[in-house]
Image (cartoon, grey):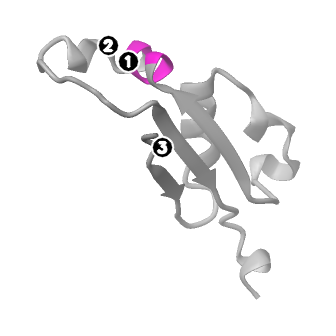
Amino acid sequence: MLRQPIVCILGHVDHGKTSLLDSIRQTRVAAREVGHITQHIGASEIPLDAIQSFCKAVLEKMPLKFTIPGLLFIDTPGHDALAK
């Protein structure tokens, strides 16, 4: 069984890591966080059809065949207080 690759979203505080995933997932996780800053580690499994829909304009220009079932995104907090 082929499993989805794991993508870890890393970056400094307030750089849009969770907002990027919110756009892909069509959610509003960042809006519910204190100061819009993620306070915990989260995981999201994004199926291939959702990725293909989100990236449709780019994929129409590239004849690619996918064999993965999707991607597993790990969203990490970027808050300096959580690094200590």
Residue depicted at 65% across the width and 40% down the height: 44
Q: CA distance from mark 2 to mark 3?
A: 22 Å
Q: Which residue is mark 3?
A: 3
Question: Does 24 lie within the magenta span?
Answer: no
Q: Which residue is mark 1?
A: 52
Circle 3 SS class: loop
Where in the figure is residue 59, as x and y percent of width and height? Answer: 23, 18
Question: Does 50 lie within the magenta span?
Answer: yes
Type of amino acid at the residue the image marks with label 2: Lys
Mark 2 and mark 3 in contact? Answer it, CB < 8 Å.
no
What's the magenta bit mostly, secondary-structure-wise?
helix
Q: Is residue 29 above or below residue 11?
A: above
Mark 3 surroundings within 10 Å by alpha-carbon count, few (fewer than 14), some (14 through 19), many (20 or more): few
Type of amino acid at the residue the image marks with label 1: Gln
Where in the figure is residue 6, as x and y percent of width and height? Answer: 49, 52
Circle 2 SS class: helix
Q: Is residue 55 above or below residue 39?
A: above
Q: Which residues are magenta?
A: 49-53
Q: CA distance from mark 1 to mark 2?
A: 6 Å
Left or right: residue 2 versus residue 72 is left
Q: Which residue is mark 2?
A: 56
Q: Is residue 4 above or below residue 27?
A: below
Type of amino acid at the residue the image marks with label 3: Arg
Which mark sits nearer the N-terminus, 2 or 3? 3
